[in-house]
Image: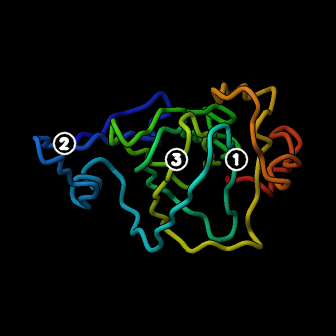
Amino acid sequence: MKVIETRIPDVKVIEPRVFEDERGYFLESYRESVLQEAGITEAFIQDNISKSYKGTVRGLHYQLEQPQAKLVQCVVGTILDVAVDVRAGSKTFGQYVATKLSADNHKQMYVPVGFAHGFSVLSVEAVVYYKCSDYYHQPSERGVRWDDPDIRINWGVDKPVLSDKDRVQPLLKSISKNELFT
């Protein structure tokens, strides 16, 4: 298992070793000791699975009161996984990391607390499996508009399919500091 630094040091890409032969493949998808050596020390306490179809954009979401670090992987299809820094005062505030996660490349992205998370579906369908460091807490869920012109994410989809909630999220510059991480 290899942990790869990104342009925002707190966000990491994890690349497992894959052992493939005529029967299929085997890989170790999680090893706490390797992640801890790379500075990823959260205890993951909730696992989630979502299935989405081509062109879907989910996000950008974060929880303020029960913040979640996430370890995200795509087990069917291909997604563009995105983490946006929403830590007020951070030198990378408003910047993002995006990486393709797929059933073929087996990569994972670690999204730390303090980042809004989202993804777009680039294949016909995608199944995303992710670990969270805290429980889902709807009252503290917040978001940033998926197409914020100051962030300028290229989601890789022509006609995004969005939830009603994601269509009306605020632009990052309009979110008050007490609704961001400090």
| Residue shown at the point (43%, 31%) measured from the top left | 6
Q: Mark 2 falls on what kind of element?
A: strand
> Three-letter amino acid code at disc 1?
Leu
Query: Residue 56 versus residue 28: which sits nearer the camera?
Result: 56
Q: CA distance from mark 2 to mark 1?
A: 30 Å
Q: CA distance from mark 3 to mark 1?
A: 18 Å
Residue named by callout 2 = 18
Q: Which comes sooner in the sequence, label 3 or label 2?
A: 2
Disc 1 crowd rating (10 Å Cα; few below 14, some 14-19, many 20+) is: many
Residue named by callout 1 = 60
Residue named by callout 3 = 126
Q: Quadrant of residue 172?
A: top right
Disc number lying in front (2 or 1): 2
Q: Mark 1 falls on what kind of element?
A: strand
> Three-letter amino acid code at disc 3?
Ala
Disc 2 crowd rating (10 Å Cα; few below 14, some 14-19, many 20+) is: some
x, y percent for residue 50: 56, 59
Q: Which comes sooner in the sequence, label 3 or label 1?
A: 1
Q: CA distance from mark 3 to mark 2?
A: 20 Å
